[in-house]
Amino acid sequence: QVQLVESGGGLVQAGGSLRLSCAASGRTFSIFNANMAWFRQAPGKERQFVAVITSTGGRTFYADSVKGRFTISRDNAKNTVYLEMNSLKPEDTAVYYCAADLSSALRTARYAYDYWGQGTQVTVAS
């Protein structure tokens, strides 16, 4: 059984920063073999891709809406993925989800991901 547990969400003023963490666990699961991504879902909207990082951390890809403001990183030794969010805007308000893709392709579609966390709420006040 694989568990992804997000943390670090909260309420922040516009222009502020937050750092999300996603800790992975499971008897036979290691994020070392998975591309890891962050998605987000605002109220009344579909879940959308935010950022992805390859299993080795060598490549990253971001949604245009967060490029230059968000940074995804990983620490395979700690089985943890991070999302550093700076210059936050009210439109960044959403539940943020961590996801794992066991394929080797760099993918942004929700259906491509094998495992999901429960999400952490990020609220940006104007």
Image (tube, rainbow, N blue to C red):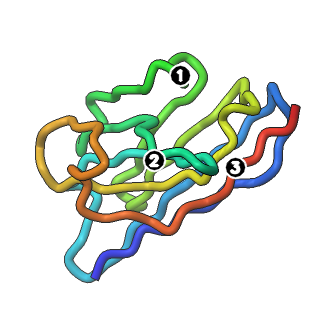
Image quadrant for the C terminus?
top right
What is the residue that sits farthest to the left in this orientation?
A: 104
Question: Does the residue at mark 2 contact the one at mark 3 (Cβ under 8 Å)?
Answer: no
Which mark, by number, is residue 47?
A: 2
Which mark, by number, is residue 101?
A: none
Question: In terms of depth relative to the viewer, which is nearer, 125 or 2?
Answer: 125
In the rendered image of this protein, does residue 1 appear above or below residue 78? below
Question: In terms of depth relative to the viewer, which is nearer, 83 or 89?
Answer: 89
Determine whether the residue tagged by mark 2 lies in a helix, strand or loop: loop
* Amino acid type at image mark 3: Val
* Amino acid type at image mark 2: Arg
* Amino acid type at image mark 1: Ser
Look at 28% across and 28% down and name the residue there: 59
The mark closer to the camera, 1 or 2, is: 2
- Percent across and percent down for residue 85 are 63, 34
Which mark, by number, is residue 65?
A: 1
Question: Does the residue at mark 1 contact the one at mark 3 (Cβ under 8 Å)?
Answer: no
Look at 63% across and 50% down and name the residue there: 43
Q: Earlier in the sequence, mark 1 or mark 2?
A: 2
Q: Earlier in the sequence, mark 2 or mark 3?
A: 2
